[in-house]
Image (tube, grey):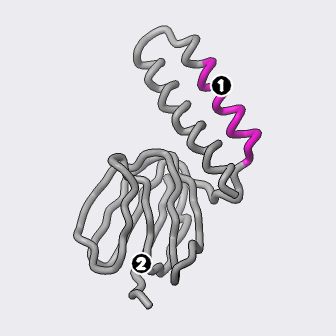
Amino acid sequence: MAESFSFELVSPEKLLLSDNVEMVVVPGAEGDFGVLTGHSPLISSLRPGVIDTYNGDKVEKRIFVAGGFAEVTRERCTVLAEEAVAVEDIDAGVAQDRVKAANEAISAAENDTARNGAETELAVAEAMLSAGSLT
């Protein structure tokens, strides 16, 4: 049995999860990375995706994050998420509506700043829709 460590998931509104886990897999900007006790310290930006927490060899929790940052130390992993929702709580209809709205915003964008913001929202909405199909 692997040693557990502290995992915290924080959104702008509140602390969403504080738990001891044996492993966590995080959607880093450069690819997914796994964290175990004693991991080398790092800070990484996140892409939209799913965080998996493990105890034993089973996934205990699956949480969609829209992006943010992860800080890893030898004893802890803290994720500061822009938006987070449990995978089982994702509403496919809401995610599809976000995809549609983002596509409309891209079409209506009058400058690069608006277009970039809409493209970012589209990436989040598509990742959320994909994550929702995992349940």
Q: Is mark 2 on a helix, strand or loop?
A: strand
Percent x, y for residue 115? 47, 18
Residue 67 numbered tag:
none
Give the residue at mark 2: 6
Furthest residue toward top:
110
Q: What element carries label 1?
A: helix
Residue at screen point 63% across, 18% down: 104
18 relative to 91 in the view: left or right: left
Identify the mark nearer the N-term, 1 or 2: 2
- Residues packed near mark 1 inside 10 Å, few (<14), some (14 to 19) or many (20 plus): some
Percent x, y for residue 13? 54, 55
Percent x, y for residue 126? 59, 37
Percent x, y for residue 134? 65, 55
Q: Is residue 127 above or below residue 1?
A: above
Q: Which amino acid does label 1 sit on?
A: Ala
- Residue nearer the viewer, 13 or 123: 123
29 relative to 14 in the view: left or right: left
Q: In which quarter of the image is residue 4?
A: bottom left
Region rendered in magenta = 91-104
Q: In which quarter of the image is the N terminus?
A: bottom left
Taking the magenta stretch, the answer to whether it contains residue 97 is: yes
How many numbered discs? Answer: 2
Give the residue at mark 1: 101
Q: Which amino acid does label 2 sit on?
A: Ser
Furthest residue toward front:
57
Residue at screen point 56% across, 42% down: 127
Secondary structure that dominates the magenta span? helix
Q: Is residue 100 above or below residue 63?
A: above
How far is mark 1 from mark 2, CA to CA? 38 Å
Q: Is residue 119 above or below residue 11?
A: above
Q: Quadrant of the C terminus?
A: bottom right
Residue at screen point 48% across, 48% down: 82
